[in-house]
Amino acid sequence: MNELQQQFVTEARELVRQATDDLISLERDSTSAAHIDRVFRAFHTLKGSAGVVELPAMTLLLHAAEDLLTAVRGGSVAANGEIVDLSLACLDQVSRWVDDFEEAAALPADAGEAARSMAERLRTFLPADNAAVVAPAPKVTAPVAKGETADWVVRLLDRSRDKIAEHLRSGTTTLHSIAYEPIPGCFFNGDDPLELMRQVPGLLAFHIEPREPFPPLAELDPYACNLRLQAIAASERDDIFKIFRMVPDQVRIATVPESALPSAPVSAKPAQDASLIHIVLEAQLELLRVTDKPEGLAGRIGAARRTALNALRSGGLTSIADAVERNDAVSDAIEQALAGLTTSTAPDTPRTDTGDRPAERMLRVSEDKIEALVNLAGELIVAKNALAHSVKATGGTGDAALRRDQDAIDRLVIELHGSILQLRMISVAQVFRSFPRLIRDVARQLNKTVNLVTQGENTEADKTIVDRLFEPMVHLVRNAVDHGIETPEQRSAAGKPEQATITIAASRAGDRFHVDVHDDGRGIDPSAIRRRAADKQLLPADELAALTDEHVIDLIFAAGFSTAETISDVSGRGIGMDVVRTAVERMGGRVTLASKVGAGTSVRLDMPMTISMSRIMVVQAGGQSFGISMDAVSETVRLSPDRINRIKNNEGFVLRDQVVPVVSLAELMRLPVNPAAASRLFLIAESGGRTAAFEIDAIGERLEVVLKPMQGLLSGARGYAGTTLLGNGQVLLVLDVKEIMP
Amino acid sequence: MAEAVAARTSEMKRILVVDDSSLVRLYYRAALEKSGFTVEQAINGLEAMEKVLSEAFDLVIVDVNMPRMDGLAFIAALRSEADAHIAATPALMISTESERQDMLAATSAGANFYLVKPVSEADLVKHAAVLTGASP
C-alpha cells in the first residue's frame, strides 16, 4: 500500500467514527442542523477520499447516502430511526471495505453488487422528484501570474513581516503561497473554504477578499461563494496540497522565492517562551558565579536551584527537572539541563503562554514501533545492570572515569525508560467512543431510550490498561441498559423521565485511574440477590443471613452469579460481574459497586495508571503450578539420574565446572514428590551470587503478568513474590527465588 | 478542563509584589491575579521582610528604588536569612535601569531574574509562571 492509500485508511476510519457519533446525536435531536451538517460533511469527505484512491463501489454507495442526507438537510426527508439505521449500515459496510482495502489494497469482488443494492435501498427514501443539487463547476483561471511573485504575495509578506522574519530565524521550511478561489457553488459541495484554510499547517499570513465586488444586497445570492482566500504558509507543498485535494482545480500553490522574503530583523525579538526557560537557566548560572560575597551564599544557591527547577517544570520538562533535583552540584546540574534542553525532543514549548501558542505538533507512530522501543528500553535496562556488574568486577581500583560514565548511562537509561513508557499513555477517548453506538443498538433492541453522558474522555493511562478496559466496560454498560434501566413505561410509572441516563466517566486520583459507570435505573435489590445466592447455594444460609445489604450486593461479583432473571440476547449468557472483576483484578485494579433501589447503580473500576509487567515462567512441581520470575532463571537442564551426586544429605551435580546444589521444589513446598523418572528436570536459578537447581516436573508457558503482592493472612508469608491471575481465573503463586535459595 | 487545571496550579502560587508605587502594585496585582496567582503586597523592603518571614512565597517581585529599604538590600537580606527555605525564595527584580552594571548589582544581591520597565502584562505573567514553576 502506498502512502496515499494508508492515509486514506486512517482518515476513512476517523470519518466513519465521526459520522457514527454524529448520526447518533442526530437521532437524539433530529432537528439539529449542526448535526445534519456534520454527518453530511463526513459522508461527503469520505466519498471524495474514496474517489481519490479509486474505489468506485464505495464512491457509488456514499454518493447515494450523500443524496439522502442532502434531502434530510433540505428538510424533504425526516431524520428518523430508519434513516439513521440505514446510514449506520452504510458506514458499517464502508468500514468493512476499509478493512478489506487495508489488507488487499482492493475491495472484494462483490463490492459493486453490494454497493448497488444498498444504494437502491437508500434511494427508496428519497422523494420522487429529488435530483441531486450540485452546482456546475466553472473553471477558474489561475490567479497567480507565472514566474513573477504575485503582488498579493508581496503585500502579504510585507504585512506579516515580523512573523515571517521570526519564522525565518528558526525554521528552515520553504514558504508557499496559497491562492484559493472556491467555485460559487462550493457550499453545495459541502466545502468550507475558511475551515480548509484553517487546516493549513504553519500558516503565517492570511487574507480574504471578495472575488468580485459585492452586488447590491437585493441582488446578492447568499448561497454563492464570492471569496478569494490567500495565504502564506511555512509547510511542505504536499502537506498543503493534501488539504486541498478535493478542490485541486480551485487552488494554486507556489513557492515563495527567497528574493521576495524580508531580510532578518536587526534586533532580536524579546525572549520567546521556548528560549525563556533557557534564559532563566542561564541567569541562574550567572547568579551562582557570584562567589565574592560570602553572606547569603547558601540562599543564592538555594534560590538558583529552586528557580531552575521551577523554570523546567513550568515547561513540562519534569524529567530534566528531576535530574537537576537529584544532582547536588547545582551549577553542573543546570549546565547539563541546558545541554539537555537543546538536544531534547521532549516538549520544549513551555506552556506558559496563554495566547497565541502554536498548536502542539502530533506525530502518528505505529504501535509496533512504540512496542519495539519499549522492548529495547527493557533490554537496555538489563544491559545497564550488566554494565554495573562488570564495572564492579574491575574492583575497588576501578577507573573513576569509567564509573562516572557508568553513572551517567545509568541515569540516562532510567530516564529513557520512563520517557518511553510515557509514549504509551493514551486517552480513554477511543474506548469511550464505542459506547454511543453500543448503547444505542442495545437500547433500541430492548425498546428503551437511553442518553449517554461521557466525562473525562481525555484522561490518560497506559495503553495496556486502556486496551483492556473495553471488555469489562462493555459488560457494565450492557448490564446497565439491560438490567439496570427500566422500560419507558416503568420509568414514567415510577415518576422518572422516560429517557434514562447512563454516565461513563474517567478520572485520575493520584497515581490511580478511575472509571465510573453510573445508571439511573432501578438499582439492585438486595433481597433478590439473597434469594439468588440461596438458590445457587453460594453461602450457607446462616452466613447469608448475617450479611448486611451492602455486603450482599457484593455477591454479584461471585463466580457463577448472574442476576438476569431470563437469559436475554443482550447480557446474561452465563457471564456476569465476576468476569468484570477478574478482568479488572488482572490489571491490578479493584471493582466497587454502590446501588440504591429505585435510584440507580454505580460501578467504579479503580485501576493503576501504569502497569508494571513481570515476565514469569510457569513450572509444575508436586502437582501444582508455580510462577518463577524469568529474571532469576538462567537456564533449564534435563539430566539422567546418574549425573546427580549425593553429598551427605543433599544432592548436587556439576554444571560447567561448578557444583550446583539440588532443591526439590515439591519438597520445599511440602507437596508429594513424584517418583524419580528416567530423566530429571532442573531449573537453574541465580540470585545474590548463588546458584541453585530447582527440580521441577514440567515447564509451562512464559507469561507477562501483573504481580499482586500477597494480601491478608498471607501478606507475611516468605518465599512468595506475589500472586497473579491466570487466564482461566486460577490464582498462580509466584515464587521469590531470592528467598527460597538454599 | 485544561484551563481549570491551569487556574488551579497558578492559584496555589503565591507572589509578593514589592514596590513603593501603588499604581505599579495595582497593575502587577491585576495582571497576576487574572492569571490565577495569589498576590500580596509590600511598599518597601522592610515591610517585605516582615511578610516573607511570616508566610512562604513562591516568588518576590521587587522594585529597585524604594524608601527605607531598597530592593537590592531586601534581596540581599532575604538570601542571608537563616531559614533555608525562606532564603531560597525566587526573586524577580524589575527596574527602570537597563545598564549592565545595574543587572550585575541585582545578580550580586541574589536576584534570580531581571526585567526592565515597562513590563507588559503578558511578559509579567509569562515570567512569573516560569519562575514559580506554574504549570500551564
Image: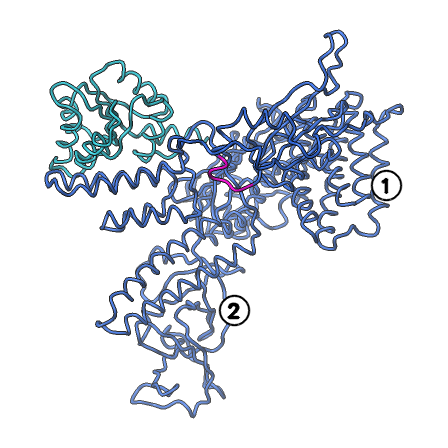
Chain colours: A blue, B cyan
Give how far across and how far down residue A248 sits, in percent.
Answer: 73, 35
Which chain letter goes with mark 2?
A
The structure residue drawn at horizontal position 82% and vertical position 25%, both measured from the top left corner, is: A133
Which chain letter goes with mark 1?
A
Query: Which residue is tagged 1?
Result: A116
Residue B130 figure quarter? top left
Residue B17 figure quarter? top left
Q: What secondary structure is found at the residue carrying circle 2?
A: strand
Relative to A370, residue B132 above or below: above
Whether residue A598 is visible: yes
**Disc sitting over residue A475 in the figure:** none
Whether residue A489 is visible: no
Mark closer to the chain start, 2 or 1: 1
Question: Is A577 included in the stretch rendered in magenta?
Answer: no
Give how far across and how far down residue A303 sits, in percent.
Answer: 22, 38
The structure residue drawn at horizontal position 37% and vertical position 72%, both measured from the top left corner, is: A669
Taking depth in this image into account, of A280 and A51 the one nearest to the observer is: A280
**Disc sitting over residue A701 in the figure:** 2
Mark nearest the camera among 2 and 1 is: 1
Q: CA distance from mark 2 to mark 1?
A: 51 Å
Question: Is A169 included in the stretch rendered in magenta?
Answer: yes
- Say few, some or many: other residues with alpha carbon within 10 Å of mark 2 (under 14 / 14 to 19 / 20 or more): few
Give how far across and how far down residue A211 sits, in percent.
Answer: 71, 20
The structure residue drawn at horizontal position 32% and vertical position 74%, both measured from the top left corner, is: A741
Part of the protein shown in magenta: A167-173
